[in-house]
Image (cartoon, rainbow, N blue to C red):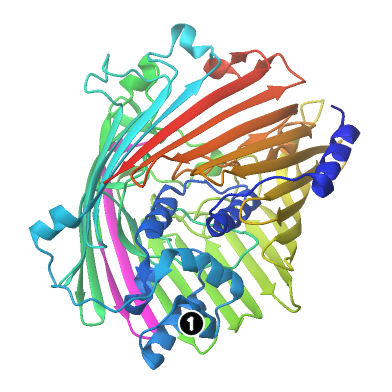
Amino acid sequence: MNKHTAILFVLFMLFFNVTVFSQDPIVNEWESVMEQIAVTDEYTDVNWDHELEELTNRLDQPLNLNEVTKEKLLIFPFLTELQIEDLLAYLYINGPMQSVYELQLVESMDKQSIELLIPYVCVKPVEKSPTFPSLKNILTKGRHELMTRIDIPFYKRKGYEDSYLGPPVYHSTRYGFRYKDHVYAGITAEKDAGEPFLALHNTKGYDHYSFYFLLKDIRRIKTLALGNYRLSFGQGLVMSNDFIMGKSTSLYTLGNRAEGIKKHASTDEFNYQQGAAVAVNWKKICLSAFYSHRSLDGIVKEEQITSINKSGLHRTQKEAERSNLFALQLMGGNVAYTTNRLKMGVTGIYYFFDKPYEPALREYAKYNIRGNHFYNLGVDYKYRWNRFLLSGEAAIGKSGGYALLNTLSYSKANNYTVSLVHRLYTHDYWAMYASSFSEGGHVQNENGWYLAVEANPFRYWKYFVSLDFFSFPWLKYGIDRASSGVDVQFQSTYAPSSKLSMFIRYRYKKKDKNYTNEEKVKSVLPLHQHRLKYQFNYKANAFLAFKSVADYTHLHQPGVQGSEGYQLAQVCTYAFRKWPLKCELQGSWFHTDDYFSRVYSYEKGMMYSFSVPSYYGIGTRIAFHMKYDVSQRLMIMAKVGQTRYHDRDEIGSGLDLIRGNKKADAQLQVRYKL
């Protein structure tokens, strides 16, 4: 199929195709919001296990609006700080709600936010329960969930010929126990593709095990965690194991983050702590303390750590030998003072390796950490005055470097919101567990101003505009000098009804990048990138709908031939009327000149997962997704997909090389709830 034929094909489908829609329309709307966020920020690491799990659990155990707290509402990424404050103020002034539709009376609540929130909340009288639940109630009224997943490839990588030690199948099992919002416990086990199972270095079965136990809101104990857990405080300049939503086409989550101690139930093998953590409430003060001791993978030479491996892969003999070679201990605490308008906090961490960390650093990374012992200290704040919200954090590290992040937001009811963000991360600031707003993907070596406006000036229309000026005072990977850039985004959304919506998005980014000419002379030139996306959604009724997507990207450097990429996609979903069976078929065609002009495509994945793969070259992708609720307790989910390239005979390189132009795989997931 050539380029022009593909364009005509999708235009035909835009206007004449009839497809079908899931029975969970509102849940899919939130997935659509997440999709937009994911594919907008190219540095986003899309790992939303925790967020998706919490939202899914809330569908089964809706949150009673009459006993909500600010902390509980922060789990909903689509609520702004102002909406949360206005909802709590409404309950304080008017007393308990009688219906969820009273949300329409909350001043800053718009139609979209209410539609997204309703599936996860309910309204009922507040039950007076004992402060500490009895063990009998916990064991008899708690809920169990067992979920297993297997991924099977229908191709063979080169590594399985003589290097990978295990079968090419991915497998994971998760067990979780939950009693209301007070007690959580569980275990997660995972084997990546290529890792042995019940053999060689994995004689105990899976390659990775993760345990957690969490108590919440038990008298003065706000949170108690044992085993594996996550931490997030302030704006993330010192400590954050959470997923951070970067620059997107929504101001839902900018500066809005749930802080504290949380369970770690995902299959992520690196981004968590292991040990114990506790948070205690005392009047308006919350005191948190934590300790972690972990063994890490990497390379050790002459009793010195030269690199840290974060992938968690142990497929080859060499990868297995690099497992658990050194230990990292971390301890620290947080003190937070909170009133109706003001929140202030102090976070400090101290961490050390049992061997000196001495990586072979290149010039651009010469200010990264070296040695055994490190620390970071930060002070964060958040202050609300009427419709203004000012928040931020200041942090320092062992090297003397510092990081500053400040955000000023103004909201006028549900008509428009303006946010201004300034960050200043010095080149010598280094924090191992920092994760926050940035262009370069790291809280280091960056200075920038970000301005965004979201407005609903007309009925059915919504606009978003953002402008980001940034600079990197020191060298970066792929940029051999100090550099700067600009990032501009615009999106217009038209939604005349709940059945019909569409948006068009344009993004322009200019960043400096190394360039080597034919004479092998290296220089730094500005790289101009343009991205354009159009999406059309139509829902005929509770069963019928379709989505069509068109993407275009163009890149060029001065004096260098540019490259461009296209993608056209169509999504069709069918939900049976008499059976709890939902099927989705997605097809796409892509054509890019090279890897740099690659395109991104959202695909529905397995439960608690989110897939945004990228494609380059010329090819097609087709995927079929199915979910069948056998009963209220048993759910089966499956997915089959194939990517076919028309411009190559081999896919990938090295041990991951696939001899052929097709790549097909299947996924199966089973969940049982009790």
Q: Residues within 10 Å of mark 1 (few under 14, many from 20)?
A: few
Left or right, 364 with respect to 489, comes to left
Taking the spot 60% from the left edge, 55% from the top edge, the residue there is: 37
Q: Quadrant of residue 357?
A: top left
Mark 1 highlights which residue?
102
Q: Is residue 404 above or below residue 4?
A: below
Taking the spot 42% from the left edge, 47% from the top edge, the residue there is: 49
Left or right, 418 with respect to 353, comes to right
Q: Is residue 577 above or below residue 468?
A: above
Q: Residue 459 location in percent, x, y?
A: 74, 77
- Seen from the viewer's position, the closer of residues 468 and 85 is 85
Q: Residue 58 location in percent, x, y?
A: 38, 60
Question: Is residue 355 highlighted in magenta?
Answer: yes
Residue at the bottom extreme of this rendering? 93
Q: Residue 200 location in percent, x, y?
A: 27, 14
Q: Secondary structure at mark 1?
A: helix
Q: Which residues are magenta?
A: 333-359
Q: Residue 12 location in percent, x, y?
A: 85, 42
Asked if one can make out residue 390 in the rendered structure from this viewpoint, the answer is no
Taking the spot 71% from the left edge, 70% from the top edge, the residue there is: 462
Q: Quadrant of residue 388?
A: bottom right
Left or right, 290 with respect to 116, comes to left
- Seen from the viewer's position, the closer of residues 102 and 649 is 102
Give the quarter of the figure containing the N terminus: top right
Question: Is residue 634 highlighted in magenta?
Answer: no
